[in-house]
Structure formats: structure tokens, C-alpha cells
Amino acid sequence: MIIDGKQIAQQIRQELREEVAAAVAQGKRAPRLGIVIVGHNPASETYVANKMKACAEVGIDAQRIALEETISEAELLREVERLNHDASIDGFIVQLPLPAHICEHTITSAIDYRKDVDGLTPENVGRTAQGLPSIVSATPRGIRELLARYNIPTDGQHVVVIGRSNIVGKPMASLLMQKHERGNATVTLCHSHTKHLKEICLTADIIIVAVGHPGLLTADMVREGATVIDVGINRVPDPNSPKGYRLCGDVDFEQVAPKCAFITPVPGGVGQMTIASLLQNTLQVYGYIR
Ligand code: BQF
């Protein structure tokens, strides 16, 4: 069965729209999200546009803060400080990746953890790892939501996560191993130095692939009846597409899908949920849900 991320994300946006409307009807101002974008990376511009559009749909007031490619790290840090202290901003993100002359760790660590809707500060990462209330990075939160809404259990299941990024692989593994009904998984974290990747994958009930390598997961690596979650968003050249490229995931979808109990498509899978969960995180810091 193909998981419909677009539909679930739409459903979440509808729920959030009602939450925002209820808060505003009680006299609260609308939630406000800051989105900092540095430079003109075309993929980043698309992602930011997706976030702005989703915010508009649910009634979140999104403020786009566009900064020059040439901004220094010190100047960007000052912008982060300004947003930390701006009481009219509930939460903000700094769109990644940043230009090479700026250290991502330095910038994300400077964000006030209470406004850190990407869940990247040491405070939120540590609290997530310890199973404490925290802001969870949007993609892992979205994947957990997708599994929950499709009633795909993780309790006692062997979940293989491929990819060790700070934004997906590590927090995903961290969530799934928690002592919790929506966790309780046996987690194996694989990466570029893993030996016997195929053999490990063949023992998985759920495989989550987040490496950014088109076609990495092939049919011979997947057990019949497994669930496959494809986090890859890769642009591949396609002369037949108006944009000159199309999106594909990290999974060889055509070959893998027939073996799966559930599989997420690209586009229309995890990417949609990443945006929906950023909105959930924004409502969380706004103090209406939680
Ligand atoms: C879809 C991202 C890599 C690096 C930085 C919907 C998005 C993508 C695809 C989107 C992503 C990927 C985002 C689809 C945000 C997900 O329908 O398949 C939405 O906008 N994403 C990002 O902000 O930074 C990234 C991937």
C-alpha cells in the first residue's frame, strides 16, 4: 500500500487551522513563525515557499527574512539574537544548508530552545534523547505521525534507519528507541561505513532511508512485507519535465514497492509531513497545543 503523505499532511493542516481559529476567536494573536533564508539556493527557495504557503493555509503568520549570501557569521548570529528577543515571534527557523563560510552548528546552537521549531538546539536534541518533553525535528516528527496514522506499530519491531544526519537519522533513531508505545523499537542505525547493509536491511520490519542517494535501497535489500519510509528528496535531470528536473527518493520505488506492506512515495510522502510537522511545532511553541 502506498502511504499518502499529501493526504495526511492536508488533514493535519486542517486540524491546525481549527486550533489557530479557536485561539484567535479567544482573542489571542495569530501564531508567528520567522523563516530566515541566506542566499539564493534554488532548492532552499522552493522549501521556504512551501513553508510560507502551508503557514498561510493554517493561519500562521510567517515572516520571511531574506539575507545576502555574503552575510558574515557574526551578522547572522546578531539576526538570531534579534529573533530570540522579539516577543512577537513565537518560533523561527534558519533554512539549511547555509553558505560554506558559516558554521551551521554555531548558528543553530544560538537559537533560544523555546523558539527552536526545527528542534536542532542541544537542549531539544538532549531532551528528545532522554524522552523528556521537547521540540522534535520536523522530519522525524512527521514520520512518527505517518506511522501512527496508518496504525503501523513500532513496538518490538526492528527498525533500520539508514543515514546519521543531525536533522533526520539521529533524532529518528532516538525517538523510535524511547520507552513508549510509539517507540519501543529495536533500532539499528546504518551509515556509509556500515558493513553488510543488505543483510541488516533484510532483517528489518521497517526501513527508513535518509541519505540523499537516489536508488540506494534496492529490492534485494527488502524483506517481503516490510514497510519502507523514503526520506530522500533528490533532483534528477529530466528533459521531459517543464522544470528540467524531477524529484526522486533514495528508494528504487518501482522494484521495491511490490514487496512492501507500506511504502512512502516521492514526491507526496515524507516531504509533505516535514512541512506539516513544522506547523505542529509552531503551534507547540505558541503554547496552544502541548
Ligand atoms: C513532496 C530538505 C534536504 C535538505 C534540506 C514536499 C518538501 C519536499 C518534498 C519540502 C527539505 C525536504 C525541506 C515534498 C522541506 C522537504 O511532496 O515530496 C515538501 O519543502 N521539504 C527543507 O526545508 O530543507 C531540506 C531536504
Image (cartoon, grey):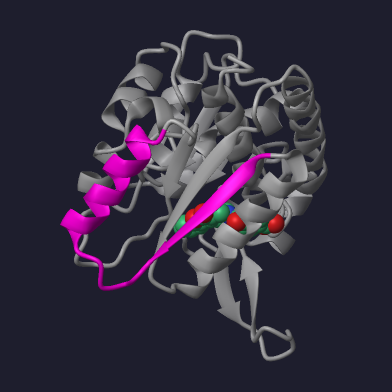
Q: Residue at x 80, y 42 (%)?
A: 10
At x 63%, y 54%, the residue is 52
Does the magenta portion include 241?
no
Q: Quick one: quadrant of the C terminus?
A: top right
Residue 242 position within the rendered picture, expressed as x and y whole percent measured from the top left: 73, 86
Residue 83 lies in the magenta stretch: yes
Residue toward you, 32 or 253: 32
In the image, the segment drawn in magenta is 60-86
Q: Residue at x 35, y 27 (%)?
A: 113
> Which quadrant is the N terminus positioned in?
top right
Q: Position of residue 142 (x, y in %)?
A: 61, 35
* Residue 65 can be seen, yes or no: yes
Inspect this view and state whether residue 219 appears.
no
Question: Residue lying farthest front?
Answer: 27
Q: Quadrant of ligand 1?
A: bottom right
Quick check: 245 above or below 223? below
Total numbered circles: 0
Q: Nearer the viewer, residue 52 or 164?
A: 52
Q: Residue furthest bottom?
A: 239
Q: Position of residue 269 (x, y in %)?
A: 70, 49
Instruction: Residue 263: name its quadrant.
Output: top right
Q: Looking at the picture, does residue 200 appear above or below residue 129?
A: below
Residue 129 point in image, percent of width and height: 36, 20
Who is closer to the viewer here, 259 or 41? 41
Q: Is residue 156 above or below residue 138?
A: above
- What residue is drawn where x is 52% and y is 30%? 159
Lateral position of residue 191 relative to residue 93, left or right: left
